[in-house]
Amino acid sequence: MTFQVRIANTGAVIACPAEQRILHAAITAGVDYPYACATGNCGACLSDLRAGEVTMLAYSDNALSAAQRAEGKVLACRARPASDVEIVWLGRGRK
C-alpha cells in the first residue's frame, strides 16, 4: 500500500510505500530533507508528525528520546507511513 506524505516545510506531497522510510521517499522525490546518518543514530532528521501514523524502526534513544516520541516527534529515516501523514522537519542535518 502507498500513502501520501505531506512535507509541511516545502508543501510537497509525495507517495511513500508502507515499506519505505519517509526520508528515503522524500529524497527519491527530490525533496531536500535534512539528514546525516540515515540510520537513527544522530537525530538530524528529527521531525514533528502533525497528522497520521507511522511505524518506527529501531533507533537510538540519543537521537529520539521517549519524551520526544510522546510529543509526536519521529525520525524520518526510521519512520514508515501507516496512513497518510503530514510531517515537518525540525533538524538541520547535512544533505
Image (cartoon, rainbow, N blue to C red):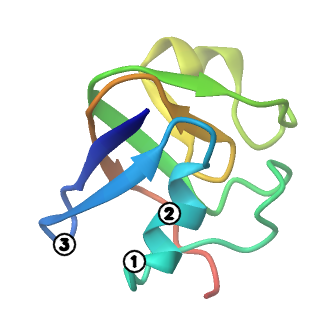
Furthest residue to the left?
A: 11
The residue identified by callout 2 is 25
In this rendered view, identify the residue nearer to me: 91 or 15: 15
Q: Does 64 sit left or right of 75 as displayed? A: right
Q: Upstream in the sequence, badge 3 or badge 1? A: 3
Residue type pointed to by label 1 = Ala
Residue 79 location, x and y as percent? 59, 38
Residue 33 location, x and y as percent? 46, 74
Judge whether 30 appears above or below 57 on screen: below
The residue identified by callout 1 is 29
- The local secondary structure at tag 3 comes to loop
Residue type pointed to by label 3 = Thr
Q: Quadrant of residue 39?
A: bottom right
Residue 68 location, x and y as percent? 56, 25
- The local secondary structure at tag 1 comes to loop
Q: Residues within 10 Å of mark 1 (few under 14, many from 20)?
A: some
Q: Which mark is residue 10?
A: 3
Q: Which mark is residue 53?
A: none
Judge whether 34 appears above or below 9 on screen: below
Judge whether 45 appears above or below 61 on screen: below
Residue displayed at 83% across by 36% down: 59
Residue displayed at 83% across by 39% down: 62
Q: Is label 2 in contact with label 1 (beta carbons under 8 Å)? A: yes
Q: Is label 3 in contact with label 2 (beta carbons under 8 Å)? A: no
Residue type pointed to by label 2 = Ala
In this rendered view, identify the residue nearer to me: 70 or 54: 54
Residue displayed at 63% across by 71% down: 35
In this rendered view, identify the residue nearer to me: 74 or 19: 19
Judge whether 24 appears above or below 58 on screen: below
In this rendered view, identify the residue nearer to me: 37 or 19: 19
Q: Does 45 sit left or right of 56 as displayed? A: left
Q: Quadrant of residue 58?
A: top right
